[in-house]
Amino acid sequence: MMNCRSPFAFLAVPLLVAACLLLAAVGQPAAAGELDRYLGRVAPQDIFPQAERFGPPQGEPPIAPVMRGEERLGFVYLNSDFANAVGYSGKPIKMLVGIETSGVVRSIRLVDHKEPIVLIGIPEARIVAAVNSLIGKDMAAVARGAERPPQVDIVSGATVTVLVMGDSVVRSAVGLVRSGRLGGGTDAAPVAAPAARAIDMSVSEIRSWEDLVGDGSVRRLNLSVGEVNEAFAKAGQPEAAAHAEGENEDLFIDLYAAPVSVPTIGRSLLGDEGYERLTKRLAPGQHALLVAGEGAYSFKGSGYVRGGIFDRIELVQDGSTTRFRDRNHTRLGDLAAEGAPDLPEIALFVVPEHFPFDPAQEWDLQLLVQRPVGARDKAFLTYDLAYRLPERYLVAEAPATQRPAAAPAPIPAAGEALLPAGMEDVLAMPLWERIWRDNTVNISIAAVAIGVLTLIFFFQDWLVSRPLLFTWVRRGYLAFTLFWLGWWMNAQLSVVNVITFTNALITGFSWEYFLAAPLVFILWSSVAAALLFWGRGPFCGWLCPFGALQELTNNLARFFKVPQLTLPWGLHERLWPLKYIIFLVLFGLSLHSVGLAEQWAEVEPFKTAIILKFAREWPFVIYALTLLSIGLFVERFFCRYLCPLGAALAIPGRIRMFEWLKRWPECGSPCHRCAKECPVQAIHPEGHINVNECIYCMHCQELYHDDQHCPHMIQVRVKRERWLAQNAPRPAGEAPNKPIITRNGKAVADAARPAETAGAPS
């Protein structure tokens, strides 16, 4: 079965080597911190001007003292060792931060990043200058809650990147201060801990919208266009003030926020059923917020469309901040509270588990307002919607007897979490390793599923010779792919992954970036290996959730007798190149701007239909439903003609080393049954299977073994039955049996056998 036709088969050797390195990378432990790796890239004077040398790194994660003679000026640390710094690229942005023992930031040095928006188009100096606005900020005051977390200066076109970098510096510095590792010591007189407040879960009632807004259960931020214009003017940005969204008296935004994990607030705003669904979804200690608004300005922002990040709102509490992603978001149609307004934007956000959020304490929802001031530049303002939970929902907890004033607090590690005491061994692990350990069950399920699919392919002849069994095995696997892999685990591969991977190869490859998403990593590894054996078919035909959704909905359509359309071969063949053109356009755009390529990658409906489960703005939903509706009449319409990911996989799929799909000499001449019944019309009229278009559904292999429909197999069956009839035992003296054949279970005289049964074209 070896296929030596392709000269590119020799490329399989380096690919196999790469796969071995990939597996080795998974098995090798990584260092707990990377400070040593990057410390040699800067001089001590770059961190503190008077410095002469770096002392040896200490602690886990490591920090290094910065010395002048025997005097310690402060410390330097790597931000990604302490706090999340993953931007649009999906990879950490690494910065060395110099901080005084008092907690004042003195220097920030960008030492490594893979942000395409910075690598292509926006000068790195602008990004560095924006983040340097944090220099001189006292993070000790932020850690005590005496000051609000400082904000970086925004760079137009790189909003999310800059905000992620600034957040990482602030979080890491605040966590380091709270850990007690700065300064000279921790001796302090014991002080009484303040009385703690907690949510009283026994208080649960239904209240009207007027009541909720009246007592502050729902907080509001109302801005007119004129107020925003005035704020831009006072900030020294008259051009932004001139680019208003309407007249001064027009509504700019009417923003509401409330913690719906509080029973009364949740039941009132979501209804009993909605609140019950939310509580089942939340992990112990996890909370959720409702954010709603109307007006000329949307709180969701453009980052939600491009990369799944809500870049216009930010949750702030006690010096820590977090932004929401699409996986944290559920779109709501209306509010259940009596008298609630009809708001066009209502979002339910589940606070990420790694963010230490306590709704019983004060918190803020920060709104980022941006306006264009030219062809490409933007101006920015921030507004705070401050929230304090009303006393009626709180209950006092017994205070702790004594605690040290400067008791060391857990250190925020690379996953943003404040880890509880006794988990120092976890801190020693890199982020990707902790993620893999925490997802052992899901990883095991995915590995078993890949193993089952491998067995299906290796034993395909045995399986397809049992059509009924194979049909239900395939449908069951597609259901698993759609419901568990897609809708539950959100493991839908995308052409954006290809673009990101390509940029990583150009800018410097590192396994840790891709290991941070275990299921996606496992899928890509499996797809890469499968390309050597079967081409694009294993993913497109079995492991793509959107492909599974198309095929299962088409199966339902066939069950209800929906007519199926077969495109003329000439038109069908000319539509094939569309997906390759789309892929090349996206790839070309990525060389200019990855952000722009990601935006145009919405040609894939994967995010709408699988990741967000259709809970999205109506143009995206209509687009996805339109493609699925066409697929009811033309099976896998999107896969055939529009999918850029399928095109991206088909190109390297040409190097496959084996030919597993069997053909008879009669295939294509004179028989055309397989070509007519191929679900995606991947078989040419002359009988050749186009592996670039084949999704490996194996229907042609079912026909290959079918002695009732395949002319070749009919001939084999006829000869076998004739031989059995001639050699059947007979009573003594009885005349020899006349050769007979059977057709549809009935005996037919050999002389009267129809021509088509003898092997004529079906």
Image (cartoon, rainbow, N blue to C red):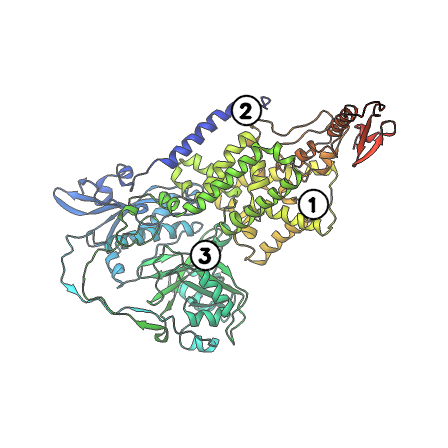
Q: Residue furthest right?
A: 752
| Mark 2 vs 3, N-terminal side | 2
Q: Position of residue 524 (x, y in %)?
A: 49, 38
The answer to whether 458 appears left or right of 41 in the picture is: right
Residue at 37 percent of width and 64 percent of height = 364
Q: Residues within 10 Å of mark 3 (few under 14, many from 20)?
A: some
Tag 1 residue: 634
Residue 328 is labelled as 3
Residue at 63 percent of width and 48 percent of height = 552
Q: Residue furthest front?
A: 732
| Mark 1 vs 2, N-terminal side | 2
SS label for mark 2: helix
The answer to whether 693 appears left or right of 438 in the picture is: right
The answer to whether 505 appears left or right of 707 in the picture is: left
Mark 2: amino acid: Phe
Nearer to us in this view, 646 or 714: 714
Above or below: residue 524 compared with residue 291: above
Above or below: residue 325 compared with residue 34: below
Q: Name the image quarter holding the N terminus.
A: top right
Using the numbered discs, state the Cα–Cα distance from disc 2 to disc 3 in whole angstroms: 44 Å
Q: Give the tally of numbered discs.
A: 3
The answer to whether 86 appears left or right of 671 in the picture is: left
SS label for mark 1: loop
Q: Name the image quarter holding the C terminus.
A: top right
Using the numbered discs, state the Cα–Cα distance from disc 3 to disc 1 in whole angstroms: 35 Å
Tag 2 residue: 8
Mark 3: amino acid: Asn
